[in-house]
Amino acid sequence: MFRSSLGALRGRAVRHASRRFYATVTDLKQYPKPGEEVSGFTLRRSKHFPELELSALELQHKKTGAQYLHVARDDSNNVFSIGFKTNPPDATGVPHILEHTTLCGSEKYPVRDPFFKMLPRSLSNFMNAFTSADHTTYPFATTNPQDFKNLMSVYLDATLHPLLNANDFNQEGWRIGPENPTDGQHDNLVFKGVVYNEMKGQMSDASYLYYIRFHEHLYPSLNNSGGDPQKITDLTHKQLTDFHHHHYHPSNAKIFTYGDMPLADHLAELDSRLKTFQSIPVDSDIKLPITLNGPQNITIKGPLDPLVPPDSQFKTSTSWLLADGGDVLERFSLSLLSALLLDGYGSPFYRGLVEAGLGSDFTPNTGFDPSTRIPVFSVGLTGVKEENVSRIKEAVAAIFQEARDKGFDKIKVDGLLHQLELGLKHKTAHFGMGIMQRVKPDWFNGLDPFNSLAWQDTVSAFKTKYAKGGFLESLIDKYFMNDNTLTFTMEPAEAYAQDLATEEANRLSAKIEEVTKKLPNEEEAHKYLAERELDLLKEQEAAANQDLSCLPTLNVKDIPRQKETKELRHSSVNNVSVQWREAPTNGLTYFRAIRSLKKIPNELREVIPLFSESIMRLGTRDKTMEQLEELIRLRTGGVSVGYHLATSPHNLGEHEEGFILSGHAFDNNIPAMYELLQTLIMETNFDGPEAEAKLRELLQMSANGALDAIASRGHTYARKYAEASLTPTALLREQTSGLTQVKLTAALASRPASESLQDVVAKLKAIQALVIGDRQNLRVALNCGTESISSNEKALDRFLTRLPSSTAEGAFGQGSSPPITGSKTFFNLPYQVYYAGLALPTVPYAHPSGAHLQILSQLLTHKHLHREIREKGGAYGGGAHAQGLGGVFSYYSYRDPNPQNTISVMQQAGEWARDRKWTEEEMGEAKLSVFQSVDAPESVSAEGMTKFLYGVDDAMAQKRREQLLDVTAEDVSKVAQEYLVDGASKASLAVLGAQKDWVKGSDGWDVKDLGMAQRQQGEDAEGSGLLQQATA
């Protein structure tokens, strides 16, 4: 429920005056006129954008020159952001480390880490900070007006008046210290630091590594703002404070607000914070790329990918620089041209490059990139054989020539324009954050932020140009029919990982030598570094009991005890149960259907992800995938079929599984959406002459990106694997979306061309028969406007009538899922950091202890694990998670340099929580943390889905809400003892990373390797047997 003070509406519920308020908040008549001054700000201009239902006002602070953009819209999820132009002077990551250290304490809030301390004192649904290539931003979003004021105060003081203590720099940036500072040993010195380890993890992602190295060569004037680990250790504390002094100043600031809160309140608060500063000259330099007056070729070394065949490890791309991004129409047209050339399996570049067998997937820089002042277009491939590297550039040139000569079918252009129109009408819960992210990059590049909002003007101008004919083709002529290119290639180096380790060891020795020169001998240097580490440790420990009374906070009383519900209606259409959510949807209808099955055989379940991809790839007997993609874009906002899995809210031993069908479209296109869904599911041709080749493409594409996907979400994979031995649902989830699925995909992708995939095709056809069968096992949910109920009933009835009334279950066995054995599993993967997950079984959703465990997870995260795993241990992230519907309590760490310490912390966390004397304030903070997600804004398309997907109705949700609000300190201690301490023997642990001496089978570790590029002799890569290989 929205509660705020809004001018004349103070103290009154806004929902009772929503129409009148909408007219007020976007009506420019109520705002100052251009040139007028309010609270130290001068309004420069304003404009209403009816297609987005918002008005934008551009202001400037008179004294400092700070730029301010306010976007007024009838949306209670208000957004704030302050950002600064931060061109990095080198690759030490100073903008990134400064982003971290500004949030470690400020003049008004001189506590350690106020940013993380505010997380449990707020009801925000978004809080973060971002370091981009040339600017840094600090955004948040909340529906609570007092929360907005609190967070704005903390953010402004953090950025403009940070303490920037040396120890905060050491903690967040880099330092040298003993791996375990409390064991009394001074010899085992290592590099530490949150950002240092974060970027080591980033560099373990080969896709990121390729992109950042490409960017460094194209834009040498724009250094790596995140920081290269090899350069981070050159940054000094003084360089950090100097960078802040010159860049984090109101004269260099761009401030953004969005939502329905009064502009006058924002202006008054901002002026009070800015007016103490004087205007200064700032670095507003817009960095430019190299000049391309002919072909340039760059080749660098990169890591091997164990999930990709050894002879297909190259990555290569060709890039063109385009015109200055100030031409909004041309930039829009180039982005649309990029989509025509690259998006979908029927696109020219996919057919001519991937389908032609030159590589397995596009490089991460592929496409139109407008994030810099001079946009870039690139196209390239990963998974390339050495002999094909030179052929790719030739193929790209030929594809451009063919597209230039043949032009583009109008249906394809119309389909993309339809997607834009539908995107404008689709009401999301985080619209304001999307607007901020769209506006900020252009704004920092000296472009007009209003142009980023003028969707309709730009689209109309494009349509006028396009109608004259030859417009898109002329852009190909203008930019791509030349060889002013950069071809960037990454070749595999077997010794790459070892070279990194050697470089780090040599750099560490050199840094220790620098310290030694200032002291009598090396022993004293080691002693000094160890003592400095202990000093930091003491400071971190002292922060645990720090007085936080200076920080603003909300209270539990700010959380409504009664949750406002969304009215649902149920009916039957053609003997199928239908859940209706009638709400304003801007003329869109959202459809979901679940086909529930009693038991899916393992050998079918494990290829459901491949089935979901294949029906969007293979085409039918009378329509190619290119033709189907055209219709999907022209008639819908997207359609899909996937795996559905839900644990019973009452019993962890019971679950529902099956298939979920989904799609959305304008109301008048719903019949066409149903026809497309039916066509994709029932008519996809798995027997076509090209079916096997296309399936191999999909498998190789998935395998090629798997290692990088794990690197970016390793803690999720580790947790999921650890949980798989605890509940039936967790096992099935691991099988379909965890490391087991990765290994299956890699195994199938590595099959030689001489070996058929007919066994896989047979399983896919069996799944096809299961997806839509007996309508008694089908249920539907529709979210739409009241005005479209009748037409939706008729369209749904026709759709259901055309479905088969029954289906065979297939000739496959119904065997139960094999258990995953072993409680300590280590996956040997070529990363520079680690990811860990430890899980314990708990209770179903409806059990009263579930709420107690949910509060406990927040207490452990904010009061213990963050300090132990991130601040002390140096990991980028760590915490606890209680799955309300999964019946599992888990711990995790992310980009962790010291997993041994982390595991010990996790294993002792239950006793720590049991023995802690929890205060009323701490309990309140934990409840606020939980309700950030419980009461987060919800898109209209998602309303009613908790009931439809998981069986949790309003009464159950309300009971859970009351249980959460009523949790006591005694409840927390009790569940800590019962489930975390007494249940410790049931815990399952999984760690991902490079195997070292401490990972031994004699200590109970079960070591696994996902590498499937070279198949083992006698390995059986078929059926449910693979699950046993991947997990045993």
Image: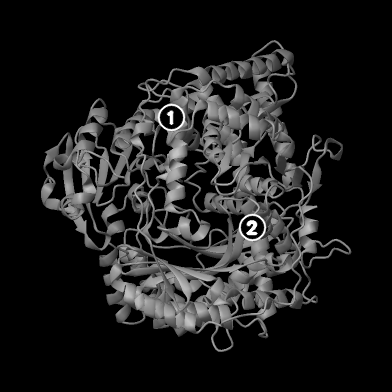
Mark sitting on residue 125? none
Q: Using residue 595 as the reference point, say whether residue 503 is left or right of it.
A: right
* Circles 2 and 1: CB atoms closer than 8 Å: no
Toward the viewer: 374 or 703?
703
Q: Mark 2 points at which residue?
A: 737
Residue 644: tell me if it is visible. Answer: yes
Disc 1 residue type (three-letter): Gly
In the rendered image of this protein, does residue 310 appear above or below residue 266?
below
Residue at the top extreme, as displayed: 520
Mark sitting on residue 924? 1
Toward the viewer: 937 or 1?
1
In the rendered image of this protein, does residue 773 appear above or below residue 999?
below
**Element type at marker 2?**
helix
> Disc 2 or 1, which lies upstream in sequence?
2
**Which callout, 2 or 1, points to the residue nearer the camera?**
1
In the rendered image of this protein, does residue 818 appear above or below residue 177?
below
At 39% from the left and 70% from the top, the residue drawn is: 419
